[in-house]
C-alpha cells in the first residue's frame, strides 16, 4: 500500500494505528542520505532483523546488485524461519520513502521487493509524492493499493466531529476548518490554540 500526502495529512499516524494489528513490524524512516544503495540496504536489513523477520547473521548488500539481493534476502528469510513464525502476519513500513524515489536503484528495489514478499507480509510506503514510474499495472493486478491525500484530508463533517472534542462548534469550527484545508495536523494545532485562548480569557 502506498500512502501519499503532504506533511501534516496524517500518514504516519494512520500507519502507526494500522501497525497495531501486527505482532512483527519493521519500521524504517528513510532520510535523504539513504539514496546511497549500500547505506539503504544496511538500514533496511537492520529494520528487518529488529522486527524478528531475519536472523542476526543476515547482512546488507555487499555489491550494487539490487534484485538478486532482495530476492535472496527474502528467500533466505523464508528458509531460516520455521513454518509457524513465517505464517504470522508481518508489516514492513518505509516512511518518507520519497527521499529515495530519484535513486537509480529504487524502481528495481521496489519491484523486486513486491514480488519477493511472502503472502503474510504487507508492505506500507509513506510518501509526500508518488514515484515517477507508472503504478497502474501494479494497481490493475491488485498488487498495490494507493491512498492519496484526497482520502486523507478531513471533510467539513469529519473536522466538525474532531473539533467537537475541543468544544469548538459553529462558526469557530468552520473558520478552523477553512484555515486548515482539511489537514489533521493543522486542525489539531488551531484547535489547541483556540482552546488555550479561551482558557486565558476565562481566567
Image: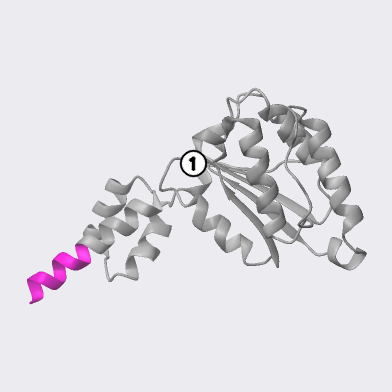
Quarter holding the C terminus? bottom left
What's the residue at 71%, 30% (across, down)?
Answer: 136
Image height of 188 relative to 34, above or below: below
Choose top left, top right, bottom left or bottom right for residue 17. Answer: bottom right
Disc 1, SS:
loop
Q: How many marks?
A: 1
Q: How is the image coloured?
A: one colour
Disc 1: which residue: 5
Could one spot residue 141 in this view of the protein? no
In the image, 150 versus 50, the foreground residue is 50
**Is 201 inside the magenta-drawn segment?**
yes
- The kind of secondary structure the magenta stretch mainly shows is helix
State left or right for residue 47 relative to residue 157. right
Could one spot residue 126 in this view of the protein? yes
**Is 75 inside the magenta-drawn segment?**
no
Other-residue count near label 1 (Cα within 10 Å), few / some / many at <14 / 14–19 / ≥20: many
Image: magenta residue range: 194-203
What's the residue at 54%, 56% (across, down)?
Answer: 14
Q: Position of residue 44 (x, y in %)?
A: 66, 45
What's the residue at 27%, 47% (across, down)?
Answer: 179
In the image, 1 versus 175, the foreground residue is 1
Choose top left, top right, bottom left or bottom right for residue 64. Answer: top right
Q: Position of residue 161 (x, y in %)?
A: 39, 65
Give the residue at the far bottom of this rendering. 203
Image height of 203 relative to 157, above or below: below
State left or right for residue 10 relative to residue 54. left
Q: Position of residue 158 (x, y in %)?
A: 43, 59
Q: Position of residue 138 (x, y in %)?
A: 75, 34
Amino acid at each position: 500500500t502506498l500512502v501519499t500526502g503532504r506533511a501534516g495529512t496524517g500518514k504516519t499516524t494512520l500507519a502507526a494505528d494500522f501497525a497495531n494489528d501486527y505482532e512483527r513490524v519493521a519500521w524504517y524512516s528513510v532520510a535523504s542520505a539513504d539514496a546511497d544503495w549500500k547505506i539503504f540496504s544496511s538500514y533496511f536489513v537492520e529494520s528487518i532483523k529488529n522486527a524478528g523477520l531475519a536472523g542476526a547473521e543476515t547482512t546488507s548488500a555487499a555489491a550494487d546488485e539490487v534484485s538478486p539481493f532482495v530476492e535472496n534476502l527474502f528467500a533466505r528469510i523464508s528458509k531460516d524461519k520455521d513454518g509457524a513464525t513465517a505464517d504470522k502476519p508481518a508489516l514492513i513500513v518505509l516512511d518518507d520513502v520519497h527521499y529515495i524515489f530519484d535513486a537509480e536503484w529504487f524502481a528495481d528495489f521496489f519491484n523486486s521487493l513486491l514480488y519477493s514478499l511472502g503472502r503474510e507480509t504487507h508492505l506500507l510506503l509513506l510518501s509526500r509524492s508518488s514515484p515517477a514510474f507508472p503504478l497502474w499495472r501494479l494497481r490493475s493486478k491488485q498488487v498495490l493499493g494507493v491512498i492519496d491525500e484526497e482520502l486523507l484530508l478531513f471533510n467539513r463533517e469529519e473536522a466538525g466531529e474532531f473539533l467537537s472534542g475541543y468544544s469548538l462548534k459553529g462558526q469557530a469550527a468552520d473558520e478552523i476548518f477553512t484555515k486548515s484545508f482539511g489537514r489533521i495536523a493543522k486542525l489539531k494545532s488551531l484547535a489547541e490554540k483556540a482552546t488555550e485562548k479561551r482558557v486565558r480569557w476565562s481566567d
